[in-house]
Image: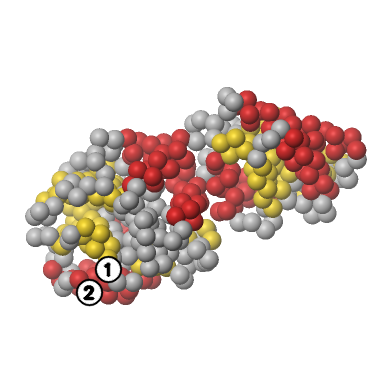
Amino acid sequence: MKPIEIRPGVYWVGVNDRVTERFEGLWPISEEGISYNAYLILDEKKAIVDLSKEMLSDDFLAQLSELFDIAELDYVIINHMEPDHTGALTHLLKLAPNVTILGMPKAVQMLSDFYGITENVERLSNGQELSLGKNTLRFVYTPFVHWPETMMTYMVEEGILFPCDGFGGYGTLDGAIFDDTCSDIEYFESEALRYFTNIVAPFSKSVLSAISKFEDTPIEIVAPSHGLIWREDPGRIIELYSRWSGYYKKPAEVGITALFGTMYRNTEHAMNAVLEGIASQGVPVYVYDVRKIHTSYILPALWTQSGVLVAAPTYEGGMFPDMMNVLMMADRKRVGNKKAAYIGSYAWSGGAQKDFESMAEKMEWDVINSIGFIGGSGEMDLDRARELGVQLAQAVISDSGA
Ligand SMILES: Cc1cc2nc3c(=O)[nH]c(=O)nc-3n(C[C@H](O)[C@H](O)[C@H](O)COP(=O)(O)O)c2cc1C
Ligand SMILES: [Fe+2]
Ligand SMILES: [Fe+2]
């Protein structure tokens, strides 16, 4: 795409990544893609906020060349050192050798660690300002959104916040880059949630702390480094990130994520009875087959719904492996504050139930009930399963204070 002017003298110079199959080597984006947004400010001094992944350096530098002679660039602002925003740096420096690179002290250390860059580098302090002529940039230290060096840049006169990964989302920008011009805002909101739960969620406390630093700051535009630019309703994405982050410490939404895996469907039959029990209480349930669905797509429900059902059999003395993977990732992403229940089949000494209970304890989930049964599920097992669904649904309802 061509550069797009978002305010006089301020340009989006992003690139779409339609090549990478897994973001950070983990999270599927082969269908959705992702954008790396950077922003060029052409004032008396010329500055760029964030860059792109190395793989797309040619596209990125071509974007810049459309607008000005790159050799005239004065500043590179590093909000975040992750290579999806700094990979193009060494290529850029060849064309703009006199540039000054600005970042928080930890970013400056990482510039040396990752790229061996130690010259023409300036350490910023929290709240420091830089005048570019007509415009002023203010640098606000927002550690751990989602690395220790992360900061957000605020353009004072125009009220533009450049938060880098904060308020970001998956999905390429297909011709339109703004919240008011994109064709499907709900898609971008749900991809922002997936991105949030995959990347940012374990740092929810830091996100809330970052948001609080801008409480009294007028924000006209939120211009993140992935996904849409929010100019019609900048408060919307801040509100969403704030709500999602809040779920780390208080009950989430009234609903249950039912995770299931099975080899020979004994567990699946019992799960169906649990689902009947849940449905009888009018609580929404979202079922995910862990054998088929990547954890990336499960985490949004797991994070936002306050109940979890784990339905999986024993496999070689422990939890069915695909389920264990989901639970381990849930732990890594600090999915807490859950009402939880387990059901699963085994044939001799079991083991899945024990693994569930120890993972639940680790994540401080409140286990409402946990049932292991031998072989196929008889009528008695199905009755217990139905009852387990009722109990879990009621726990979720009462947790919400409804
Ligand atoms: C490869 C394999 C390993 C198993 N390992 C165990 C085990 O260690 N302990 C146990 O009690 N049952 C074990 N089982 C038995 C299953 O847990 C049992 O067949 C159960 O009914 C399967 O539930 P499902 O129909 O939901 O897949 C194993 C089964 C398979 C196929
Ligand atoms: Fe990042
Ligand atoms: Fe990023």
Q: Please state which amino acid type lies under the numbered disc 1.
A: Pro
Crowd around label 2: few <14 · some 14–19 · many ≥20 (10 Å): few
- Alpha carbon separation for disc pair 1 and 2: 8 Å
Q: Mark on residue 338?
A: none
Query: Viewed as shown, does residue 185 lie left or right of 51?
Result: right
Q: Which residue is mark 2?
A: 66
Cβ atoms at labels 1 and 2 below 8 Å apart? yes
Residue 367, placed above or below residue 197: above
Crowd around label 1: few <14 · some 14–19 · many ≥20 (10 Å): many
- Residue displayed at 31% across by 67% down: 88
Between 269 and 74, the residue placed more toward the observer is: 269
- Residue displayed at 38% across by 45% down: 236
- Residue displayed at 83% across by 54% down: 264
Q: Please state which amino acid type lies under the numbered disc 2.
A: Glu
Q: Mark on residue 3?
A: 1
Between 379 and 179, the residue placed more toward the observer is: 179
- Residue 365 appears in which quarter of the rendering? top right
Residue 221, placed above or below residue 382: below
- Residue displayed at 34% across by 39% down: 211
> What SS does tag 2 mark?
helix
